[in-house]
Image: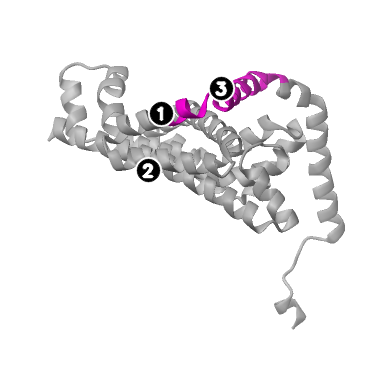
Amino acid sequence: MDWLTRFPTMNDDSLRDLKKAIDDGFRAFTRAYGDGIETFFSPLQFFLIQAERIMVQTPWPVVIAVVALIAWFASRNWKIVVGCAVTLLLIGYFGMWEDTMKTMSMILVCTVLSIIVGLPIGILMSRSERLQNIVNPILDVMQTMPSFVYLIPVVMLLGIGKVPGLIAVVIYAIPPMIRLTNLGIRLVDKEVLEAADAFGSSSWQKLRDVQMPLALPTIMAGINQTIMMALAMVVIASMIGVQGLGQPVLKAIANQYFTLGIFNGMAIVGIAIVFDRISQAYGRRLQRHMEAVHG
């Protein structure tokens, strides 16, 4: 009855040979094309370095004022504006300002990249059932894969540094952007599209003037989720050289520094709340605007 309790597996030697062949193939690929891939991503490194330099070198009152203005524009709510400003003041008061600015620059760059890559894919998915059936399983794998696993191929290809961490964060955070762009465009009322057709709108005009404006609240929800997932990945990405609030948390774990870990963890929570409140408030404003226009 042993065969009922022990699952039949591949022969140990065959399994070892298969794993070795895959590992050797990937190593050969990285040796052959690693330098070319690194060169391809050099503009991304320049963009990230410049964004970090701007965030770190800008005087703190200017940063807080800009965040407060963005919060006001997005929400028209003084409570959210004051909450964002107080959160940033507390982060600075407890000595975490520079690390917070590095983390915020990373999140901003990741969000921009996720929008640039995810928005077109979501639009194409909304127009093609076949593409949606192909991409959805890939997104399912991306969303369920343990986040540590993303670091392995990226580090093997590009080594340790900011760009590998950035790529790992983008891969981890982009699925909501793609899914909710696709969903938002598909949820546009068919009667509105028929009216656009009746006026002789081309496919591009329908997308630009009808589908994208009406899908914008849902797309904003996708941006919100992308930001939250990017922040969740920051601590893990610090293992491969991403600077910011993640590195003190990692140091606290390694050395059992309780207060260091708690303070920097709370700073991550603080900027997550700032990003979340601003993007959600803007999404709600867009929703109300669309309802007023088409209601």
Please tell me which residue is depicted at 45% across the width and 43% down the height of the picture. Answer: 87
To which quarter of the image does residue 255 belong?
A: bottom right
Is 15 situated above or below 238? below
Is 56 inside the magenta-drawn segment? yes
Q: Nearer the viewer, residue 65 or 191?
A: 65
Q: Position of residue 135 (x, y in %)?
A: 50, 39
Which residue in the structure is indicated by mark 1?
Answer: 65
Label 2 crowd (10 A; few <14 / some 14-19 / many >=20): some
Please tell me which residue is depicted at 68% across the width and 33% down the height of the picture. Answer: 164
Q: Which residues are magenta?
A: 39-64
- Residue type (three-letter) at the residue carrying disc 3: Ile
N-terminal label among 2 and 1 = 1
- Residue type (three-letter) at the residue carrying disc 2: Gly
N-terminal label among 3 and 2 = 3
In terms of secondary structure, where does tag 3 sit? helix
- Would you say 53 lies left or right of 214 here? right
- Residue type (three-letter) at the residue carrying disc 1: Ala
Distance from Cα at disc 3 to Cα at disc 1: 15 Å
In terms of secondary structure, where does tag 1 sit? helix
Discs 3/1, front: 1
Q: Position of residue 228 (x, y in %)?
A: 48, 44
Q: Position of residue 195 (x, y in %)?
A: 15, 25
Determine the main secondary structure of the stretch shown in magenta: helix
Is there CB contact under 8 Å for labels 3 and 2?
A: no
Discs 3/2, front: 2
Label 3 crowd (10 A; few <14 / some 14-19 / many >=20): some
Is 274 situated above or below 45? below
In the displayed orientation, state which residue is furthest to the bottom.
1
Which residue in the structure is indicated by mark 2?
Answer: 83
Label 1 crowd (10 A; few <14 / some 14-19 / many >=20): few
Which residue in the structure is indicated by mark 3?
Answer: 54
